[in-house]
């Protein structure tokens, strides 16, 4: 095992790294004894590190680990080589692996979305399918503190609110699956050092260097500029800010969910909200109540934009009865005399998730 090293600088680095990751796991209650874990595995340094750490603590938690690798078909023969690397490593470690390939560039073109968004959607759909098939309830992915800082900056540039500026959640519950991120408090430099000290092999994805992608420009150009000219510790500052905002948002989300139950009812697969009770709520709470209702109805808030929320606010405060706002995912919000009704657009079959 990685921890069984001869004492020296290398063993100290490894011990401190593992100690810090285990502290994160305990802080966010990521693991319980006898958990089954699906590891989202690209073969890159982050996912290799994540897998090695989970193997290191496997006996301590009595974990059952399975690997999931998706070939997005972005890079031809290189992607196939990534898959072989992942399969060989799984075999060496004695861990089961599920691999699949999906033509993400084709899907992105058909749906008219970016390749980044299409890859994320298809990747997590694959993870959910694999987890459900194997009866696994937790998915571990390799996001780190640098990813957190980059995500916060991306969302600042897109005009996100406090919910978005909370960044990447260390633990996130989605339908049928809990996503955990044990490396979320580790910097990329710490991970690189861990990889080097253990002589771990990994695959390099050249697309991570392509400044065509927004995240890569933020990583390679904007953050270095901010570090040089404004704050050398900017990544830690952004990560700390995200943690503080997440704590506040978690409280507001729980509070708003309780309020939702007090001013809504379900009728014939529709959600009806009492307008008077809704308008009595502070603006920040009102928006979160609407988010909770839409999430309950639709299952997620993909493709919802700031403009959609402004249209809903105008519907509540300004527009007459029988007015309608069309929303992504085939949803209508209809304003009646006393209620807002979340319902499906004609031709869309939908019910409460």
Image: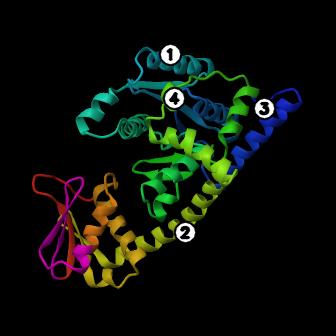
Q: Is residue 311 magenta?
A: no
What segment carries the magenta color? 314-337
Label 2 Cα crowd, 10 Å radius (few <14 / some 14-19 / many 20+): few
Lower sequence index among marks 3 and 1? 3
The residue nearer to you, when weighing 120 against 124, is 120
Residue at x 55%, y 68% (from the top left corner): 248
> Helix, strand, or loop for circle 1?
helix
Asked if the residues shown at circle 2 and circle 4 are in contact, with their CB atoms under 8 angstroms apart, the answer is: no
Image position of 151 with respect to 60: above or below: below
The alpha-carbon separation of the residues under discs 3 and 4 comes to 24 Å
> Could one spot residue 76 in this view of the protein?
yes
Residue 84's disc is 1
Label 3 Cα crowd, 10 Å radius (few <14 / some 14-19 / many 20+): few
Lower sequence index among marks 1 and 2? 1
Q: Closer to us: mark 1 or mark 2?
A: 2
Q: Label 3: which residue?
A: 3
Image coordinates of residue 185 in percent, x first then y, are 65, 48
Indicate the quadrant containing the N terminus: top left, top right, bottom left or bottom right.
top right
Outermost right residue: 7
> Helix, strand, or loop for circle 4?
loop
């Amino acid at each position: 095992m990685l921890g069984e090293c001869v004492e020296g600088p290398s063993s100290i680095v490894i011990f401190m790294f593992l100690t810090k990751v285990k502290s994160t796991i305990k802080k966010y209650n990521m693991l319980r004894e006898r958990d089954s874990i699906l590891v989202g595995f690209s073969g890159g340094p982050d996912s290799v590190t994540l897998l090695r750490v989970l193997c290191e603590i496997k006996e301590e938690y009595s974990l059952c680990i399975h690997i999931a690798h998706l070939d997005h078909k972005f890079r031809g023969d290189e992607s196939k080589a990534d898959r072989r690397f992942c399969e060989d490593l799984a075999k060496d470690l004695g861990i089961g692996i599920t691999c699949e390939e999906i033509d993400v560039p084709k899907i992105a073109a058909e749906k008219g979305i970016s390749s980044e968004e299409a890859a994320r959607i298809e990747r997590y759909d694959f993870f959910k399918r694999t987890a459900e098939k194997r009866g696994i309830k937790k998915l571990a992915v390799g996001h780190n503190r640098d990813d957190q800082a980059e995500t916060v900056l991306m969302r600042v540039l897109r005009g996100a609110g406090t919910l978005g500026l909370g960044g990447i959640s260390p633990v996130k519950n989605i339908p049928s699956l809990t996503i955990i991120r044990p490396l979320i408090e580790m910097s990329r430099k710490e991970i690189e050092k861990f990889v080097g000290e253990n002589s771990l092999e990994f695959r390099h994805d050249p697309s991570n260097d392509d400044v065509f992608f927004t995240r890569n420009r933020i990583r390679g150009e904007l953050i270095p500029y901010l570090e040089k000219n404004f704050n050398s510790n900017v990544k830690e500052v952004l990560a700390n800010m995200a943690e503080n905002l997440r704590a506040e948002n978690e409280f507001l989300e729980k509070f708003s969910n309780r309020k939702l139950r007090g001013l809504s009812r379900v009728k014939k697969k529709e959600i009806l909200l009492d307008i008077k009770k809704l308008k009595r709520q502070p603006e920040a709470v009102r928006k979160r109540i609407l988010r909770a209702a839409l999430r309950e109805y639709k299952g997620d808030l993909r493709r919802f934009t700031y403009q959609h929320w402004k249209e809903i606010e105008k519907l509540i405060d300004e527009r007459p009865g029988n007015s309608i706002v069309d929303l992504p995912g085939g949803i209508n919000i209809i304003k009646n005399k006393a209620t807002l009704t979340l319902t499906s657009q004609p031709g869309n079959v939908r019910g409460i998730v």
